[in-house]
Image: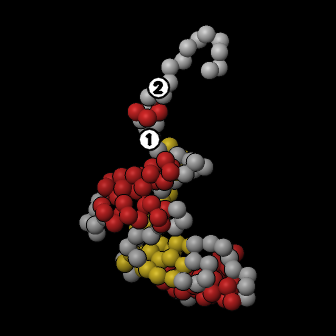
Amino acid sequence: METLESMDQTDINQDDGYTRSPSEILNYLRALMYQRRNKFNPLWNQLLVGGFKNSKPFLGYVDLIGTAYEEDFIATGYGAYLAIPLIRERWNAELDEGEARALLEDCLRVLYYRDARASSRVIIAKATADGILISEPYELQTDWEMANYYTKRSTYIPDGSSW
């Protein structure tokens, strides 16, 4: 993070009106991650870079060994296994913001149900050509009232015995 802030400050100091595009930042991070891997000191991260340049959206990914790619939708960690199949099934390029948010919340809800240490408290960010909007933290609506949790498995007899 300090390296990226330093690069941004250098751009500001040069005062020539140039700003780095998201693809340039992704390529810099790819080279950085690959260089750290080659020195046997990798940064154990999966990074997403998103933004706009010339009114075109950009979303890219780079991992700890310097593998990088661009895609219309990306998930990291456990989400790469559980959320990507849901997104592939329901995503299309013409989704409006409400449909996209509902899809994202469904993916996060599935991840919450499947991970015992996850939190149902989420923050969603949106990047547009006008800037970045980050939501306030909020709780996902969840439903734990499934039939299997309330089905009686045995009958309790209050006679004081444990058998």
Q: Earlier in the sequence, mark 2 or mark 1?
A: 1
Q: Nearer the viewer, residue 13 or 136?
A: 136
Q: Residue furthest left?
A: 94
What residue appears at the point 73 percent right and 81 percent down from the top-left corner?
41
The image shows residue 102 at horizontal and vertical percentages of 36, 52
Report if residue 149 is visible in the image. yes
Kind of residue at badge 2: Lys
The image shows residue 32 at horizontal and vertical percentages of 64, 85
The image shows residue 23 at horizontal and vertical percentages of 48, 83
Q: Nearer the viewer, residue 103 or 157?
A: 157
Q: Secondary structure at mark 2?
A: loop
- In this image, 128 relative to 27: left or right? left
Residue 4: image quadrant is bottom right
Q: Quadrant of the C terminus?
A: top right
The residue carrying mark 2 is: 152
Query: Is 133 drawn above or below residue 130 in the view shown?
Result: above
In three-dimensional space, the C-alpha distance between marks 2 and 1, rounded to whole angstroms, equals 26 Å
Mark linked to residue 141: 1
Report if residue 21 is visible in the image. no
What residue appears at the point 43 percent right and 80 percent down from the top-left corner?
70
Label 2 Cα neighbours within 10 Å, binned few <14 / some 14-19 / many ≥20: few
